[in-house]
Structures are given as C-alpha cells and as structure tokens.
C-alpha cells in the first residue's frame, strides 16, 4: 500500500507530474547503496460524461485533454471534437476526472457501460462480446509508403520519447507523414492510452489521421488496430508482433499492419500493396 507523507499526500496524486525522481536502495551482490532515478507516474483517471462516470483508466497524468477526446472518438462515444460542448480536467479524490459535456442522446447510450479498468485497458466499458469485436468500416486506399519511411518514423519515435528516456516505463504512439517525418508523439504508461492521446491530438488539431500512418512502441493487439482504423488510419506499425486477431481485424478493415519494426527491418502481415517494394512482389528484405 502506498504511504502518504507530509509533502506528498496520497490525495494529491491527481496533480502528480508525468515523472518524478525517487530514491531507492540498490542491491548488487553483497553491496548495498542508495541511489535515485526518474520513475513514471500513473493516476486513476475517471472519464465522466454529463455528470455520469463511464470508466476509470490508469494513465500518465499528461495530455489528458487529448486522452479524453481520443478515447471518446475511438470508443464511438462521439464522432468528432465538435460533439464535446465542454471539457474540464478536474482533481478528484486520489486522481483526476475528465468531465465532458456531450449531446444528451449520446450520454444516455452510455448509462450502463461504466466499469473500472486496469492500466491502458483496451476494452473499457464494453457490455458484450459484440461491442468488443466491432470492426470499423474499411479505410481508404490513398496511402503509399516506402520502407525507408517506416525506418525513419521508427527512428524518430525512438528519439522523441522524452518521458520514456527518463523512466524506461512508458509506451509511445506517433503519427508520421507518408515520407516518415514524425509530426506528433504522445506517451503513457498504457499503450491504448498513448494511442488515444495521439488520435485525440490529431482530432483537436483538425489533422486527418488518414493523411499519414501510426507507429507504436507496443505490440499490435486487435484493439490498437480497431482504434486506429476507426480514425481512417491506413497503416499501423508496431515494434512487436501482432496477434492473429489483430491481423484478421486489419484484413477486415483494409489496414496495412507492420510488426517487428526495428532499425531497417519489419514484417508486413497484411495490406502489402501500400508498401512500394511489395507492390511488385519484391519482399526479399522483409522477414
């Protein structure tokens, strides 16, 4: 159990920084020493619609307005940021409330969907298997990407993870232009949260997610494909392998799914027509 101290009461966690230096005892063989390191913070974040709490997620306390919009859109609660009439980030008890005001008809549809969730839950507030397995409409077919663009995006993402550089404990999601230039990055202890924050930031900036592609530092689970496809993302690249269900979801939605994206290698599991060399059947550099 966490202990409250005079200068850091537990009730103050809602205003915790995204990361903070902590002291610890280091053990090495028979040696014991004192040391300090930066650790990532996570706080309970309640997402509240029209005064009714819908879900509680554990998240990094940064870019929470992006999380509110991104989560709401990717979960099908709203269609665009224009549906949000008000958004307040409010300290509440031992965490944070994201208080959104949305049209009454949309709020009423959520009345029975509240639930608590673990860090970065990807199945927040669903009631049935059908809710969890909703396949987004097929994405467009306008994107073409060269392998070098994937390498560039992965490299730039690796160098723009400022919070993870300090803590080695958080995920990142980035949005790149077709040439691989990384435009936006969001980080969070939860991989779904990081993606929701990214998609929320794109929506708030009025950028079309379909104009580029998404690269993430986590595995490509089906929920990640689901969220990306719901915003029209045609290509999702991840540093780890996808699940079989993620591949099937990507195939159904027409998404290009790349896994094991590291340095200058990657696996294209489906949608290979969007990758330049693969359009002509040359897959010699892909394992």
Image (cartoon, grey):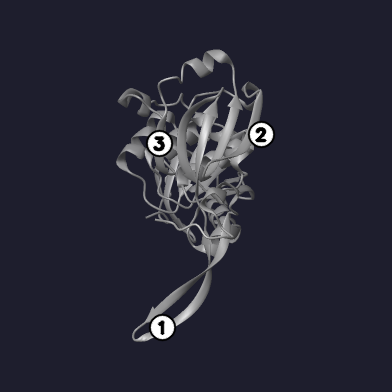
Residue farthest toward the bottom in the current orientation of the protein: 30
Spatial CA distance of label 2 from label 1 is 49 Å
Please tell me which residue lies in front, 212 or 20.
20
Q: Is residue 115 above or below residue 34?
A: above
Residue 233 location (% of width, % of height): 53, 35
Q: Earlier in the sequence, mark 3 or mark 1?
A: 1
Binning the other alpha carbons within 10 Å of mark 3 as few (below 14), some (14 to 19) or many (20 upward) gives some
Q: In the image, is residue 247 above or below residue 32?
A: above
Instruction: Tell me the residue that label 1 is attached to.
Output: 32
Q: Which residue is mark 3?
A: 116
Measured from the top left, where is residue 202 in percent x and y?
63, 37
Q: Quarter of the image containing the C terminus?
A: bottom left
Res. 204 mark: 2
Instruction: Kindly identify the residue that appears in the image at 38 percent across and 38 percent down.
Output: 222
Give how far across and how far down residue 228 sits, in percent. Answer: 49, 36
Nearer the observer: mark 2 or 1; the answer is 1
Q: Looking at this view, is 51 or 169 the one in front?
A: 51
């Amino acid at each position: 159990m966490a202990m409250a101290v005079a200068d850091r009461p537990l009730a103050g966690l809602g205003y915790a920084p995204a990361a903070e230096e902590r002291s610890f005892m280091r053990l090495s063989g028979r040696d014991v020493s004192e040391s300090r390191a930066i650790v990532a913070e996570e706080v309970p974040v309640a997402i509240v619609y029209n005064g009714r709490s819908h879900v509680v997620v554990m998240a990094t306390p940064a870019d929470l307005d992006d999380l509110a919009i991104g989560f709401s859109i990717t979960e099908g609660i709203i269609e665009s940021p224009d549906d949000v009439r008000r958004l307040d980030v409010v300290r509440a008890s031992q965490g944070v409330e994201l208080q959104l005001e949305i049209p009454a008809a949309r709020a009423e549809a959520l009345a029975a969907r509240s639930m608590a969730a673990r860090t970065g839950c990807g199945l927040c507030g669903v009631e049935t298997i059908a809710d969890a397995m909703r396949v987004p409409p097929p994405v467009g077919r306008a994107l073409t990407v060269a392998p070098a663009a994937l390498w560039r995006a992965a490299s730039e993402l690796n160098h723009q993870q400022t919070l993870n550089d300090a803590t080695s404990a958080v995920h990142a999601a980035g949005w790149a232009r077709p040439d691989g230039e990384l435009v936006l990055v969001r980080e969070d202890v939860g991989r779904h949260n990081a993606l929701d924050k990214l998609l929320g930031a794109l929506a708030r900036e009025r950028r079309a997610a379909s104009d580029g592609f998404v690269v993430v530092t986590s595995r490509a689970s089906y929920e990640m494909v689901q969220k990306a496809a719901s915003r029209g993302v045609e290509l999702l690249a991840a540093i780890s392998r996808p699940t079989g269900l993620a591949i099937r979801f990507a195939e159904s939605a027409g998404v290009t799914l790349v896994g094991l994206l590291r340095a200058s290698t990657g696996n294209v599991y489906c949608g290979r027509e969007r990758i330049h060399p693969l359009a002509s059947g040359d897959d010699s550099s892909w394992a």
